[in-house]
Image: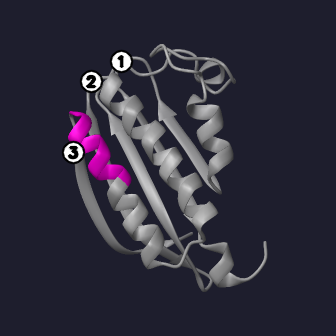
């Protein structure tokens, strides 16, 4: 279990706010010493999750610096106010897209981070929680 060190909550209701989420995630990643590759993977995941939230009714992102066992990381929780996902397994499959995108989507996002949790049901929106750890600072994986 990870303990939050600091937390920021950001709305996602337009492109400017979506960009602010990406920027905040990158700033946190730099702050904790993530490598450029780790930063890029996490910001790509954040971008996908924020875009999904925007496309599905808007929502919010919670960004937290976390620590566990001497490791430092970032937890990102993106919640949307949309219709929820009727078939989560299908939504996690490669190539699946409801927004006309390339289908990197949730399955691709899962591969970019160290921890991934999907909480959704029809009629109540979707919450995706991801955690990425700064591995370089803690030694090899």
Identified at 34% across, 23% down, the residue is: 55
Residue that badge 3 annotates? 11
Mark 3 in CB contact with mark 2 (< 8 angstroms): no
Identified at 47% across, 37% down, the residue is: 48
Residue that badge 2 annotates? 57
Mark 1 in CB contact with mark 3 (< 8 angstroms): no
54 is higher (above) or lower (below) than 110? above
Comparing 123 with 113, the one in front is 113
Comparing 24 with 65, the one in front is 24
Dot 2: element: loop
Percent position (x, y) of residue 39? 54, 62
Mark 2 in CB contact with mark 1 (< 8 angstroms): yes
Residue that badge 1 annotates? 83
The rendered magenta stretch, by its main secondary structure, is classed as helix
Query: Label 1 neighbourhood size at 10 Å, few (<14), some (14-19), many (20+)?
Result: some
Q: Nearer the viewer, mark 2 or mark 1?
A: 2
Q: Quarter of the image containing the N terminus?
A: bottom right
Query: Does the stretch in magenta take in 15?
Result: yes
Residues drawn in magenta: 14-22
Percent position (x, y) of residue 92? 63, 27
Dot 3: element: strand
């Amino acid at each position: 279990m990870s303990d939050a060190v600091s937390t920021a909550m950001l709305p996602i209701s337009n492109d400017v706010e979506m960009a602010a989420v990406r920027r905040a995630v990158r700033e946190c990643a730099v702050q904790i010493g993530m490598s450029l590759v780790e930063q890029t993977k996490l910001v790509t995941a954040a971008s996908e999750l924020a875009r999904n939230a925007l496309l599905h009714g808007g929502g919010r992102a919670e960004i937290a610096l976390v620590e566990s066992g001497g490791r430092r990381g970032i937890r990102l929780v993106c919640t949307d106010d949309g219709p929820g996902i009727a078939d989560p397994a299908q939504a996690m499959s490669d190539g699946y897209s409801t927004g006309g995108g390339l289908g990197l989507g949730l399955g691709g996002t899962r591969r970019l981070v160290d921890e991934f949790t999907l909480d959704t049901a029809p009629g109540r929106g979707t919450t995706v929680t991801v955690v990425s750890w700064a591995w370089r600072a803690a030694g090899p994986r």
